[in-house]
Amino acid sequence: MTTTIGSLSVGPLCLGTNIFGRAVDSPGTARILDAFVAGGGDFIDTADLYGGGLSETYIGDWLAGRGGRRDDVVIATKVGFPQNEVYKDLKPATIRAAVDGSLSRLRVDCIDLLYTHHDDEEVSVADIVTTLDELVKAGKVREIAASNVSPERLTEFMEYSAAEGKAAYVALQPHYSLMSRDTYEGPLADVAEKFDLAVFPYFALAMGFLTGKHRPGAEVDSVRTGGVAQYVNSERGAKVLAAMDAIAAETGAELASIALAWLSSRQQIAAPIASARKVEQLPPLLAASSLTLTTPQLDTLTTASA
């Protein structure tokens, strides 16, 4: 099962790599990426911010170790995030420099999918789109996409690109999961549907909470324990885990597979983004695409997470 976005074709799971360079070293990155591709995965998501640039560097090391072969993988990266001390905005010069930096670290001539990581409303839509269009025409970027953008600005971007005949966003990356519904559902989802954007949700497993390993009283070896705490002792978290536990008993599927299968059933979702710190964490992620939940099961999860 693949999704076509512009000139790209991607599978039903996107591997997130924001822990590469932070909790996973270069050899570990190579092992995970090898296992991901061997398991049928073909879509890898990174950003110039991740690991202070090490995520891109390690992915570049892996690509080089394969002799530069990359026709079986699609690489997405992002530029322009406020916490990036070097490339924190979307001014034309910043975008150009950031893209060159990413190309160098990834050791590639062209970025398959480039996201504006965080919208910069101090820069005009015209300046951002024109710069991205120039990068596409220069062969440095194949397709462009948006993340962390308001419905209003996303509409402006799409309408400007259409009116001016310039490169247009083909995808959207919002924060969205069973534990975070209102970050996508509603006006943003309506815009994604209106312009038929492929949607790739990040934090699809709520920083690991939806794997089921983070529960009250449990000690978990995870770099995201602090972030997951907001869900562990919440009433909503308890309801969602109870619903997932019941469905796991019915299907024999792991909780991570169930959470991703629910997400994949939602409006415009092309592939959830999920990460793995160890190779052993990949199977339930890859298995999600072959798990078909019944309508009652999907409804149960939707109700529990409301």
Image: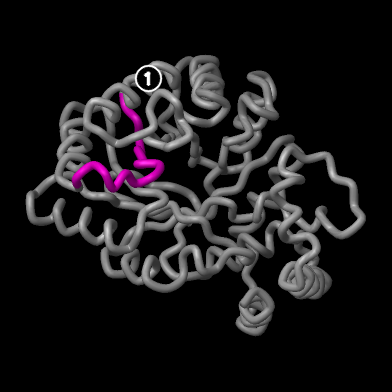
Residue 211 in magenta stretch? no
Amino acid type indicated by mark 1: Gly
Residue 203 on image: x %, y %: 59, 52
Is 254 above or below relative to 292? above
Give residue 258's quadrant in the image: bottom right
Tell which residue pokes out farthest to the left in this image: 164
* Snapshot colouring: one colour
Between 284 and 148, the one nearer to me in the picture? 148
- Residue at (32% x, 44% y) in the render: 120
At 58% from the left edge and 62% from the top edge, which residue is drawn? 177
* Residue 186 position in % (x across, y down): 42, 73
Give the extent of the magenta segment.
110-124
Q: State the residue at coordinates (49%, 20%).
A: 60
* Quadrant of image for the C terminus: bottom right
Image position of 43 (left or right of 286): left
Instruction: Tell me where residue 5 appears, x and y as whole percent.
Output: 33, 51
The residue lying furthest to the front in this view is 122
Which element carries disc 1, helix, strand or loop?
A: helix
Disc 1 crowd, CA 10 A, few/some/many (<14, 14-19, 20+):
some
Q: Is the magenta stretch mostly helix, strand or loop?
A: loop
Residue carrying label 1: 101
- Does any portion of residue 196 appear in the rendered image? yes
